[in-house]
Amino acid sequence: MEENKCGCCSEEVKNETIGNYVCYCNHVSEQDIIEAINNGATTVESVIKVTGAMENSNCAVNNPKGTCCYPDIAAVYNKYKKNM
């Protein structure tokens, strides 16, 4: 699967979340991603669309890691999707 990057980031990052949000730009939490999956989101892209993650992103400033949140969103999706 090809990983998407937000508009502000282009480097590879580790799949670890830091703090309360998975997507800091739009305040999307792990719980928001779980709810999206429970409500029928079947891909990472559909989770992004449903939650509003990565819209108008500025991860370099907003994310404590200073990197794109897509890998973190995908990691959370994969963590919970296989359990449902």
Image (spheres, rainbow, N blue to C red):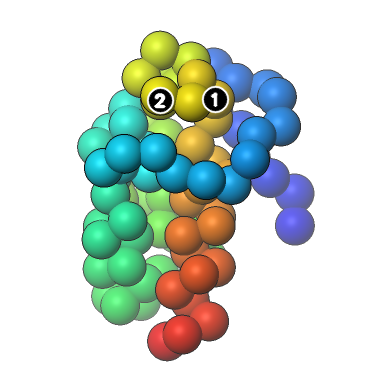
SS label for mark 2: loop
Residue 3 appears in the rendering: yes
Residue occupying image coordinates x 54% and y 17%: 8
Placement of the C terminus among the 4 image quadrants: bottom left
Report, in whole angstroms, how far the alpha carbon at label 1 lies from the one at label 2. 6 Å
**Nearer to me, 71 or 7:** 71
Reply above or below: 32 against 26.
Answer: below
Report the residue at 54% width, 25% height from top.
Answer: 67
C-beta proximity under 8 Å, tags 1 and 2: yes
Residue 68 at x, y percent in the picture? 54, 30
Occupied quadrant, residue 12 = top right
Residue sitting at the far bottom: 84
- The spot of residue 63 in percent (x, y) is 40, 25
Q: Nearer the viewer, residue 48 or 11?
A: 11
Point 55% across, 68% down: residue: 78
**Residue to which mark 2 is pinned:** 63
- The correct choice, above or below, for 2 with respect to 55 in the image is below
Indicate the amino acid at tag 2.
Answer: Asn
Q: Is residue 49 left or right of residue 81?
A: left
| Label 2: how many Cα within 10 Å (few below 14, some 14–19, many 20+) | many
Q: Nearer the viewer, residue 52 or 22?
A: 22
Residue found 60% across the figure and 21% down from its top: 9
Picture quadrant of residue 10? top right
Which residue type does callout 1 highlight?
Thr
Q: Is 71 left, or right, of 66 in this rendering?
A: right
Residue lying furthest top in this view?
61
Along the horizontal axis of the image, is 13 left or right of 45? Answer: right
- Residue 14: image location, x then y, percent: 63, 40
Circle 1: element type: loop
Q: How many marks?
A: 2
Q: Which residue is mark 1?
A: 67
Q: Residues within 10 Å of mark 1 (few under 14, many from 20)?
A: many
